[in-house]
Structures are given as structure tokens and as C-alpha cells.
Image (spheres, rainbow, N blue to C red):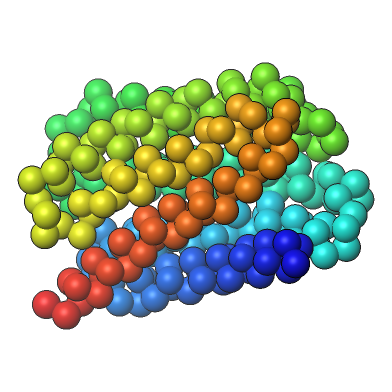
Amino acid sequence: MGIIFESLFDIIYLIGVIIIGISIIKNAKDFEHKLFGIMAIILGCGDAFHLVPRIISIITNDFASHTVSLGIGQMITSVTMTIFYLILFNIFKIRYKKENTKTLDIIVYVLASLRIILSLLPQNQWTAIEKSYTWGIYRNIPFAILGIIIIVLFINETKHKKEDTYSKMGIAIILSFAFYIPVVLLSSVYPLIGVLMMPKTLAYVWIVYLGYVDTKKISKQ
């Protein structure tokens, strides 16, 4: 039963988030919302590199034969997730008209670049059965800092704007990291913690859904 549930969950997620992304682009009236749609599609396509091999492994009950594809998929997802947050940062800047942010831009792009570089290094042992726990920590440090910055930006900008659809964006990002960090830190010792990736995924769906709702609102104006 668990095998069927996880497989269906992953399939519905991948198809759903890509469809929502396409719908956002289709209904977008400005660059901000088109960018949001692109971000959603990158999220779905990036996660597919990891989740499709995982679905196959679950169904066939054979993870060993797909170690390489699973590892490479995780590496690609690590990169595309970073790009996801870079796009979200730029959406924030466009929406709230933040132009003089040179120092912030440098910090965000340095953190994102560092995360991507660390994710691509062979020390991660992506294609090995046992991935490097230490490098799992290393590559997620700049990612976590990047996430904190974007959380603070959205919360500070929207805290007095209850009518703003993005007012819940900070909460959604907080939840995504709250579910993700325990997996990074503890899943190698307590594999059951890996189940937190499901609510983490739902948090990302919420982020994408906020963009979808806002796009529909703007398109009706």
C-alpha cells in the first residue's frame, strides 16, 4: 500500500506542478507571472530527474540497479532547486520594485553559485550507494542561508499587506525547509525521517499555487 501511495503521490505531483506552471504562463499578463510559471516548470522537470528513477525503483523493488540514475537525479534536483530560489528572488524584486539591491544581489548569487558548485563536486558521491553525509551538510549550508534570506524578504515585505497573495509565501518556504533539514541531518541514521519529503513537496506545491492564484487574480483585472 505504501509503495502505491508514494508512487501515485510523486506522479501526481510531477504532472500537477508542470501543468500549473504551463497554466500560469498561459494566463500571465506580465513578466513576473511568466517567470513564476517558468519557475514551476523548472521545479517539476528538475524533480523528475530524481523522482522518475525513484518511482521505477519503488515499483520494481530494486534500488540497487538504479543507484546511478537516482544519484545523478538528486544532483540535478539539487541544482534546479537552487535555480528555483534564484527565480523566486527575482520575482520578489520585480513584484516589489526593488532596484537598488546590488549588495543583496551579490550575496544571493554567491550563495546560489556556491550551492551549485558544491552540488557538482565528486566528493558528494552521488552515484555511490552510500552518499557522503558530510558533503550533504556542506552543500546545504549556502542553500539554507539563501532560503532564510528569501523568507525574511517576503515576510518583511508582506507583513502589513494582508491582501497580497504572496503574504503566505514566507510561511510556505519556512515549512519546506522545516521538513527538509531533518531529512538532510538524520535520514542516514533514521531512514523513516525520509517521509518528511512528502510534506516538504506539498510546501513547494503551495508556493506554486500562490503564484497560480495571483496570476488568475491579475488576469481577471
Residue 69 higher or lower than 206, as above or below: above
Judge by depth and name the residue closer to the eye, 102 or 144. 144
Farthest left residue in view = 160
- Taking the image as shown, residue 214 lies to the left or right of residue 69, namely left
Judge by depth and name the residue closer to the eye, 124 or 5. 5
Q: Position of residue 164 (x, y in %)?
A: 15, 57
Query: What residue is drawn where x is 26% and y is 27%?
Result: 104
Residue 25 higher or lower than 140, as above or below: below
Quarter occupied by residue 48: bottom right
Query: What residue is drawn where x is 24% and y is 66%?
Result: 214
Image quarter of the N terminus: bottom right
Quarter occupied by residue 57: bottom right
Query: What residue is drawn where x is 37% and y is 55%?
Result: 207
Q: How many labels does the image show?
A: 0
Quarter occupied by residue 208: bottom left
- Taking the image as shown, residue 100 lies to the left or right of residue 66, namely left
- Taking the image as shown, residue 201 lies to the left or right of residue 4, namely left
Regarding residue 76, the answer to whether it shows in the image is no
Residue 38 higher or lower than 82, as above or below: below
Image quarter of the C terminus: bottom left
Q: Where is residue 117 in the image (x, y as percent from the top left)?
A: 58, 28
Query: What residue is drawn where x is 50% and y is 48%?
Result: 200
Q: Position of residue 150 (x, y in %)?
A: 31, 37
Regarding residue 13, the answer to whether it shows in the image is yes
- Taking the image as shown, residue 79 lies to the left or right of residue 74, namely left
Q: Where is residue 56 in the image (x, y as percent from the top left)?
A: 80, 62
Residue 42 higher or lower than 151, as above or below: below
